[in-house]
Amino acid sequence: MNSKYQHTLDYLFSQLPMYQRVGSTAFKKDLTNTIALCEANNNPHKKLKCIHVGGTNGKGSVSHIIAAVLQENGYKVGLYTSPHYKDFRERIKINGEFISEGAVVTFTENNKEIFKKIAPSFFEMTVVMAFDYFVKQEVDYAVIEVGLGGRLDSTNVIEPLLSIITNISFDHTDMLGNTLPEIAFEKAGIIKSNIPVIIGEINEETKSVFDNIAKAKNAQIQFADVNNNILKLNSDLVNGTTFEFNNKRNNKINFKTDLIGNYQLKNLNTALASIYYLKQNNIVPINELSIESGIQKVKQLSKFTGRFQVLQMNPTVIIDSAHNEGGIKELFKEIKQFTYKELHIVFGTVKDKDLSKILPLLPKRATYYFCKANIPRGLEAKQLFHHAKEHNLSGNYFNSVEVAYNTALSNAKKEDLILVTGSIFIIAEVL
């Protein structure tokens, strides 16, 4: 890492409010800063062909799957996701390659004056950096993941070819609302006039919200789990998953993927429904063979990390960035299918999560290693430990993620399972 780049990162992290570190005070409830930053950079978002992916859970997975298929088809594909695990540059990729350190430095230097003038958030700045980079690198398509919500998210300045909303679950209720219809309304803010939208999972509470907004905007709407179905054939930690996808307009197709986890089937269903929509409506020319080979190599092509990732065997160590009610439910449904002797869980979260919704979902038959990620927004491990005790979860608290993880490693026998979860920032430190 060159010193100029390190200096730039230090500036960005210190000057601009960052939601991941400080929480909701960094969340801007309008798009004025993003629009001003775009204008200062010749409106790069207007020169991109984008696919916009929102939702509560799975939007990162769906974005990576679509990017992998487009890339395998021979396209130059920009991919913007957040947050990052280890390296800031993970947020902005082209065909799996991170943005160069030089491009981060140049964009920041060129925009310092406008940063001073409008004081954008960290996220607003990175979104426009991505748009600018993708235009300069002349990508064919850009897959853009929503950061938070949808309606007021900085990414929502784009006019995409297709909007995708994976699902709706409780998360960020302090900003998005306390009911599923309220959250759905915010997520549905990415639906644009006359631009089709794919909804990943249908829900009786939220379906009418999507139907009404799509109708008002004359946007063709399709529900992925109504029009398609998907069936797991087999799966293992080493070789990935084989599944059957049944698209109403195709015969049943068998696919193999390097993604692991039953919950990835929902994401694959949403992604494939979107890919076939783009193909069948001649929005993006896509070859059938590249769908098959792209799905097979999602991790390899898009550098996908942190979701149900196996770090080692004997003992098995799995990391997963489930951090809200929906994600944690799916994760433990998955864990139930494994055979192991003892379960060790390295767990930490952030201050603004509703523990009364999350802690009851955690298994009682496990040893917990509570810890706090090294960010201001992290919940103190001792506090988490005391809340967990009220829910009959037993274990201990540790003064760092590293100590918690190493203790779990030294306590676990070969036939045990260690799971690291609860927060993206806990995963980042283990990685």
Image (spheres, grey):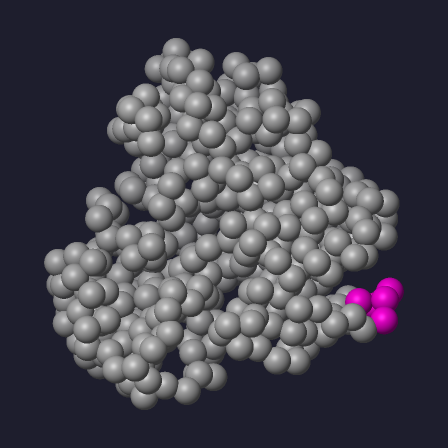
User: In the displayed structure, does residue 306 sit left or right of residue 18?
Assistant: right
Q: Can residue 185 be found in the magenta stretch?
A: no
**Residue 53: percent from left, percent from top:** 60, 48
Q: Is residue 332 above or below residue 87?
A: below
When asked about the image quadrant of residue 371, the answer is: bottom left
User: In the displayed structure, does residue 172 sit left or right of residue 371?
Assistant: right
Residue ID at (71%, 34%)? 140
Q: Can residue 250 be found in the magenta stretch?
A: yes
Q: Is residue 266 above or below residue 151?
A: below
User: In the displayed structure, does residue 77 sit left or right of residue 387?
Assistant: right
Between 309 and 121, the one lying in front of the other is: 309
Q: Is residue 397 above or below residue 352?
A: below
Between 3 and 379, the one lying in front of the other is: 3
Q: Is residue 211 visible in this depiction of the protein? A: no
Q: Is residue 169 visible in this depiction of the protein? A: yes
Q: Quadrant of the C terminus?
A: bottom left
**Residue 382: percent from left, percent from top:** 13, 63
Residue ID at (81%, 51%)? 287
Of helix, strand and loop, which mostly describes the magenta segment?
loop
When asked about the image quadrant of residue 263, the answer is: bottom right
**Residue 197: percent from left, percent from top:** 71, 50
Q: Which residues are magenta?
A: 247-251
User: In the displayed structure, does residue 63 sit left or right of residue 56?
Assistant: right
**Image label count:** 0
Residue ID at (44%, 64%)? 309
Q: Quadrant of the N terminus?
A: top left
**Residue 208: percent from left, percent from top:** 67, 59
Furthest-top residue in this view:
113
Between 240 and 59, the one lying in front of the other is: 240
Residue ID at (74%, 56%)? 291
